[in-house]
Amino acid sequence: MGEPQNPQCLDQPHVDPAAQDFVACLRLDQFCKVAAACRAGLECHPGKHTIGGFNVVQELEFSDGIVWLARIPLPDHCFQPDECTLSYVAILKYVKQHSSIPVPTVYHHALKSNPKNTTDTTFLLMERLPGHELQALEPDDDDDDSDWSLDDLRIVRKVHEQLTDIIIDLASLTFDKIGSLRENSSGSFFVTEYVDPNTTAFPKERTAAFKSLEPKYRGPFSTVSDLYHASCLLGKAHVPIDPEKVCREETIEDFETLDKMRSRLRIAEYEYGPFVLFHNDLTVQNILVDDEYNITGIIDFPGTVAPLQSLCVYPWLFHENYAGPMADRDLFYEVFTTREASNQSSLLASKDVRKTLLDTANDRQTFERSLQGVYTTVTLPTIYKNIYGKPYRGEN
């Protein structure tokens, strides 16, 4: 990738050194060249950047004041970066075309393997949306819910109503298969192998395990049970090559236990679809708002089509241990289960359907987190006890 051109990242001790080295060597001149070509040669120069868990986001500033973002997967952190980038591009385009959900416009993308890609890395160029990250409205340490102000409660209700509308809208974007969304050369969208970008532990080993599976276990899937079964097989295939696994036999047993449990989490009426566009990381940094708490952007979609019951859960901001009313489940529950749906074509237009699915969301969400492998040893005992009424492996 050449000599370091991005000195801003060299003094960030809280960032993984490999990520710092990667960002330091990005060919920022080439990103600016590509961006400028998209705007008839308008002068462009690099701005600030942010290093996240899976991607680098680099600002590209034009001479007319417009700012674009280059989203670049970290090769040692991101599971199948090329596939995830293609799916993210497809999701953003599809949502932009078929809904009013505010998502960034995609201007350009290229894979590292493309011989015409002079940046020497996979990336996409997209719009920088207005607004800032949602604030959790966390109170002082000695506050409790009786101290929440009427203004805070009004703001929270406004945000929860908008999140409800977004989830309802996503449930109107339906497909007949579970997998990752892609766009072909003619602009048509299709569902392909299920690549979950939220796989965080040893992505290279996880990729090898994924590719070792028979094609039918990589997707796309026609039923929820097929997805769950394939996820268990992927977990088992990953165990022997996971550098951190010590109790390998116990971990394989964990996935076999999850495989047996999948019928308990199955909801018959949604087993065969339709399936919906998905966002499993709706938390503060992925929800942009203006100063009046109008949602101005939703970012970082996983790029997947998933079961309806996977979408209809408490958004991730309710799992982040935030205090205060913004992350209060009771407040969200009241809005989510009573709000009138303006989008009557949605699978979640019915308040009764939303209530039924949210009432059973905790076990389902815990089970699906267990399937990812990263959280299995923590979450499996909880879901096992909830379903079977006894400790897992006799644990207390």
Image: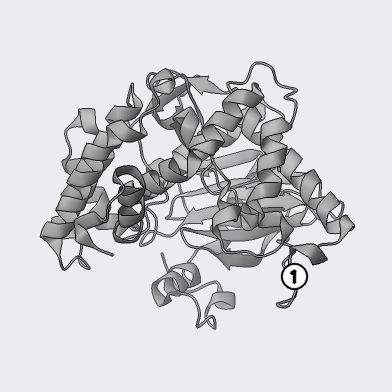
Residue 329, percent from left and from top: 63, 50
The image's colouring method is one colour
Which kind of residue does numbered mark 1 sit on?
Pro
Is 221 rendered above or below residue 202? above
**Which residue in the protein does label 1 denote?**
139
Name the image quarter holding the C terminus.
bottom left
Residue 8, percent from left and from top: 59, 76
| Picture quadrant where residue 82 is located | top left
Residue 201, percent from left and from top: 32, 60
Residue at the (22%, 68%) spot, across then down: 244
Residue 135 visible here: yes
Residue at the (73%, 48%) spot, across then down: 129
Please state which of residues 331 and 321 is positioned toward the viewer in this rendering.
331
Residue at the (31%, 53%) spot, across then down: 380
Name the image quarter holding the N terminus.
bottom left
| Picture quadrant where residue 304 is located | top left
Secondary structure state at the residue bearing disc 1: loop
| Picture quadrant where residue 137 is located | bottom right
Please state which of residues 283 and 53 is positioned toward the viewer in this rendering.
283
Is 282 rendered above or below residue 48? above
Is 193 rendered above or below residue 140? above
Horizontal side of residue 275 vs 381, given as left or right: right
Circle 1 residues within 10 Å: few <14, some 14–19, many ≥20: some
Residue 234 visible here: no
Horizontal side of residue 212 vs 299, given as left or right: left
Please state which of residues 240 and 22 is positioned toward the viewer in this rendering.
240
Horizontal side of residue 302 vs 381, given as left or right: right
